[in-house]
Image (cartoon, coloured by chain):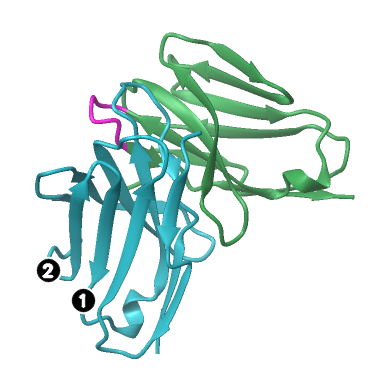
Chain colours: A cyan, B green
Amino acid sequence: GAVVSQHPSRVICKSGTSVKIECRSLDFQATTMFWYRQFPKQSLMLMATSNEGSKATYEQGVEKDKFLINHASLTLSTLTVTSAHPEDSSFYICSALPGQANQPQHFGDGTRLSIL
Amino acid sequence: SQQGEEDPQALSIQEGENATMNCSYKTSINNLQWYRQNSGRGLVHLILIRSNEREKHSGRLRVTLDTSKKSSSLLITASRAADTASYFCATGYNAGNMLTFGGGTRLMVKP
C-alpha cells in the first residue's frame, strides 16, 4: 500500500517551455503533499508544502510564480515550472502524507527535468 | 538549510560486512526517519523512530536514537550488493510532519 505515482519520469524541453509534473497518491488520501528538488549527489531540498484546498506554503528562496503548485484533490498535486530555463534543470520529487501524525512520507519516483 | 548531518558521506564495504551510518541533528524532534534512494529514483521509507524510542529493528536494519546527543545511527547487517544506494535521515519536528533531510550517505556494497 501507500503508493505515490509521479509523472512524467523524464522531461527534456526547450528553454521557455512550461512543464507540469503530477503527483498522485494511488491508494490513500493525502491531505498534505510535499515538493522537493534534488541536485546531483546532494540531499533533498523542500520547495513547498501543498495542502488540499488551500494555497501552497513555499520555502524561503523558492519563487511562487516560477513554481506553481495546485493541490486539486486529496489524491493529486501538480507542480508547474513556468518558463523553464536551464538553471531549472534538476530532479524533482514529490511525497504524500496520510492524515495521521508521526507517519512516514511516501515518495514518488521523481521527475528528471532537463531544459535545453 | 539542512537540519541533519550524516557521517560518513560515502562508505564502501564488502558483501557480508555490516554498514553503520550516523546522523546528527540540531533541534528537538518528534521523530526521525531513515530513507533509501537508488540512483535516479524516489525515496523508500525504511524506519521511523519516535522521539521517545531508543532503538528499532526491521529485518537487517537497526536504528538507534539518542535524543540527549541529538544523534541516530542506522546499522545494516550482513550487507548485500543490492543494498548499494544513498541513505538519508530525516527529522520530523512539527505537527505538519515536514521533514528536513540530512546530506545522505552513499553506500557501495561490493560483491
How many residues crowd mark 1 within 10 Å: few (<14), some (14–19), many (20+)?
some
* Residue A5 to residue A28: above or below: below
| Badge 1 element | loop
Range drawn in magenta? B93-98
* Residue A43 to residue A26: above or below: below
Please name the residue shown 31% across and 21% down the image. A101
- Spot occupied by residue A52 in the image (x, y as percentages of width and height): 17, 42
Type of the residue with mark 2: Asp
**A54 lies left or right of A24:** left
Type of the residue with mark 1: Thr
Residue labelled with disc 2: A65
Q: Which mark is residue A68?
A: none
Name the chain letter of the residue that bears numbered label 2.
A
* Residue B44 to residue A76: above or below: above
Is mark 1 in CB contact (under 8 Å) with mark 2? yes
- Spot occupied by residue A91 in the image (x, y as percentages of width and height): 44, 65
- For the C terminus of chain A, give its image quadrant: bottom left
Frontmost residue, B109 versus B6:
B109
Residue labelled with disc 1: A82
* Residue A71 to residue A22: above or below: above
How many residues crowd mark 2 within 10 Å: few (<14), some (14–19), many (20+)?
few
